[in-house]
Amino acid sequence: MECSKESPCLRQVVLQLLLFRLFIPLVLVGVIANVGMAYSAEQNLVKQQKQVIHSVADTVGYHLDQGGRILDAVARVAETSGESNLSIFMESTWKSYGYFETIYHLDKDNKIMLMMPSDYRYIGLDMSNIPGFKKSGVNKDITISLPFISPRTGEPTVYLNRALSNGGYVIGELNLGLFQHEILSISDTSNKDFVFIMDETGKLLAHPSSDMVKQQINFSNLEMYQSILTGKTNDLYIYNGRIVIGSAARLEETGWIIVDQVPLSVFFSTYALNLGLMLLASIAIWLVLVRNLGKELQRYVVSPLEHLSKGTNALTAGDFSQYNSIESIPTAFNELNKLAADFQFMNYNLQVRENSLQESEKRYRGLFNRVPIGLFRVTISGEILNVNPMVVFILGYPSKEELFKINIKNLLYKPSMDNTKEEAVIEDIWNEKSFETQLKHYDGTIIWVQININIVCDSKDEKMYLEGSIQDITQRKHTENMIKKQQELLLKAEIEQREILEKALVMKDQFISLISHEFKTPLNVIYSAIQLIECIYFNQISDRVKELIGSIKINTFRQLRLANNLLDITKLNSGHFKLNMKNIDIVFLIEAITESVELYANQKNIEISFDSNVISKIISIDEEKIERIILNILSNAIKFTDNGGRVDVILNENSELNLVEIKIIDTGIGIPKDKQELIFERFGQVDSNLSRQAEGTGIGLSLVKSLVDILEGTIEVESELGVGSTFIIKLPLKEGIADDEVEACLDFENRLVNEIKVEFSDIYL
């Protein structure tokens, strides 16, 4: 197999790995290390330059300071001694120290009185006209002139001036040639340092080239001069066409500037040479490594792998005779030896699997031909690749060969449609995993079949062909059609029966509504007559008759309650139940209802109380519906609570859930767990004996549940037999209706009294 860019040889891969993962990184590390060393050396160079500058600065400072001390000693003698003694001292000082070229003693008018070495030609000379005679101070007593080139010595020189207390001056002509010798000594000692000294104006005071000093060359345009004036002590700039690293310091006493320059080429030449040598050595090592490694790879890796590749190709072709040839492969390391052993093991296993596969193919072929289900394989375009005999039998073809001539698309029964729709239908069929369709039989008839297919894809997830099973379901379809017709007839009959039942229910509701209305009319007449008798003949009626009248009123209220409940139920069933929403103070309403039934609770010595977490809460709600709900539950609580019991009504506002919760808690007989859902069903009763004792019908709580649902609330019960019950009503907090006033208290109290009489008709007063 030839090597290519997409499939490189092992030798190329190994060499690339060594080059990019080992050699180049090592070279880069070396280069970076060299650069780091250069940077570190540059920092050290700057430090060395500063040391050189400080050394020169110390020399300059010492030279000036020592001159100032000597001149100060001469001045003190001049202040305390006569001219003869001063002359002797000046001569001895000039000869002994040799610091000054000339020492002058001036009078008050700056004229020379005495000088050493003595020269009568200068006696009486006025030195006040010398430019820069008084400049900056070495100390508080000594001043220094601007530097100049001495016409006698040709060296840079300055005047040190010491004022005398008795008038006049002592002046020393200080030669600065010592600085020239100092920087020449530094240049001779170090091949890289280039030191020179400038005054504050940029004129040279000392330079390796003495001619430039004598010419008083000005370096004020030098970048280092400009930098030191701004406080920058180090800079990189061009000097005489070469890039240099400059470092400078400025003397505080005189303003003179000392500069040390090192050419960048001199500094980096060593590191450039090291870098070049390192790269050359690296290339040489790489060439030797490539040559030797290539031979070793070819001998110990590539050749054995080529043998294994030939053996693999033979296995691919089904030749399992390479087992012995693999044993002769030269192996130089354990991994390759293991690979050869694995190849031999694979060769053996493949041979075993090939034999097993051939046996399995025989079994599959026998099963494929004998299975009582049609099996097929077709291309995506519909060409038949293979079928078993059952497919031929189902479709009625005389042989497989005849069936192979047919495209599967031509077998599909498709009512008249254009080619576009036909292709769409076929595409939809192929997208299904399991479907039922109609096919054309060989004799021209149409049969129903159940087809299960699976799309086989290659490794790139591209569709290759379809395989699946087919079953003749024509008889089953015929049976299903007959069953479907029977179901349609049954459904039609059921619909007719439902319509008849619904009509009967409507008639029942109408009948109950009519009976309830007719029932309420005589009850209202009876109740009105009883009230009239009580008003007119109350004092003339015996106690026995009063008892009978009370019994008549109670039973009248019971029948009115029953009639009202029946009417409400028919309204709920017919959907004619309407709400009358008003702005109501729910806290006031519930508290008023609770207080209104205290008379009935006191009859059984039952303590009843009300509590709330808010003082007032105006919401939009149907007041009458709430009254009926609360009165019904309170009547049950009092009815089924023994003497001496307790009933608590608690109202809580839950602003997070936006609802109001009303709890009615009693210590009555309780409700069994299995009967707690029953109480909200129509005519549902926990115990018929209890109902008879308490004169109940089983309609009340069912109606309460319906009323709560209409108000978009919920009601639930928590109860324990023999302990008591808690009814929890949760109503949404709806905002009050705009411009709607709260109902008058008088109308509310009158209506509440009448409703209590009806709802509490089971409780005798």
Image (tube, rainbow, N blue to C red):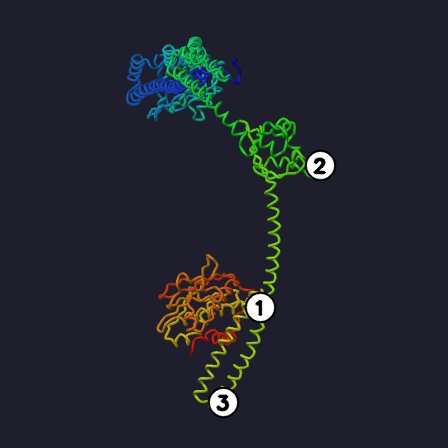
Q: Is residue 449 left or right of residue 285?
A: right
**Which amino acid type corresponds to the residue marked 1 in the rendered image?**
Lys
Name the residue that disc number 3 marks: 537
Q: Which mark is residue 418?
A: 2
Residue in front for this viewpoint, 706 or 661: 706
Dot 2 or dot 3, earlier in sequence: 2
Kindly indicate the quadrant of the structure image that contains residue 66: top left
**Which amino acid type corresponds to the residue marked 3 in the rendered image?**
Tyr
- Residue at the limit of the structure toward the bottom, as seen here: 540
Q: Is residue 715 above or below residue 387?
A: below
Residue 366 location (% of width, % of height): 52, 28
Looking at the rendered image, the disc whose residue lies closer to the viewer, 2 or 3, is 2
Question: CA gap, disc 3 to disc 1?
Answer: 43 Å
Q: How many marks?
A: 3
Q: Is residue 713 left or right of residue 466?
A: left
Looking at the rendered image, the disc whose residue lies closer to the viewer, 3 or 1, is 1
Residue in front for this viewpoint, 440 or 758: 440
Label 3 crowd (10 A; few <14 / some 14-19 / many >=20): few
User: Is disc 1 placed on a helix, strand or loop?
Assistant: helix
